[in-house]
Amino acid sequence: MKVAITSQNLRTVTAHAGRAHRFLIYDIRCPCAPQEIEPLDLPEEMAFHSFHGGRHPIDGVTAIITGSAQDDFVSHMAQRGIEVVCSAEENPLQAVHDYIQGIVKPPKVFVRKRA
């Protein structure tokens, strides 16, 4: 089983999953010791915001852990059999451990005030 982390800088969990084109991939077959495997660095046109159908290199992961995602992205990934998990955790390995343990830290919700 594999989990993908959106990470534009390849160091931290980043937001805007639909626009992400850089992912850290972890093998979680051994839940006590998830292993980072080769990062996935795609051309910008392969970000799901721009991608239009067919097989995608992210296909086959169990989940995508990200800082934020729109509802349509979550729905689109569900159609591919991929769970989307939004997390406030910035450390990718800790985010994977949290996911495995089912204790994901929810991201902060920003409420816009009307003028």
Image (cartoon, grey):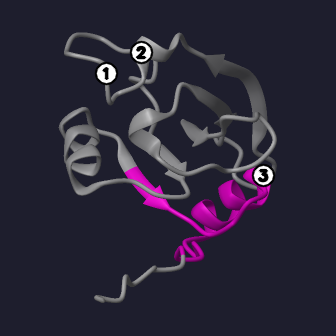
Q: Mark 2 highlights which residue?
A: 46
Separation of disc 3 and disc 2 at Cα?
24 Å
The reply to whether dot 1 and dot 2 touch (C-beta < 8 Å) is yes
Q: The disc labelled 3 sits on which kind of residue?
A: Leu
Helix, strand or loop at label 2? It is helix
Residues shaded magenta: 84-107
User: Does the segment drawn in magenta span residue 87?
Assistant: yes
- Residue at image location 19% in from the left, 15% down from the top: 53
Q: Is residue 97 left or right of residue 56?
A: right
Quarter of the picture holding the N terminus: top right
Q: The disc labelled 2 sits on which kind of residue?
A: Met
Q: Mark 3 highlights which residue?
A: 93
**Viewer-side residue, 13 vs 100:** 13
The reply to whether dot 3 and dot 2 touch (C-beta < 8 Å) is no
Location of residue 115 by image quarter: bottom left
Separation of disc 1 and disc 2 at Cα?
6 Å
User: Does the segment drawn in magenta span residue 115?
Assistant: no
x then y, percent, for residue 75: 20, 48
Q: Mark 1 highlights which residue?
A: 50
Helix, strand or loop at label 1? It is loop
Location of residue 28 by image quarter: top right
Q: Is residue 112 above or below residue 102?
A: below
The reply to whether dot 1 and dot 3 touch (C-beta < 8 Å) is no
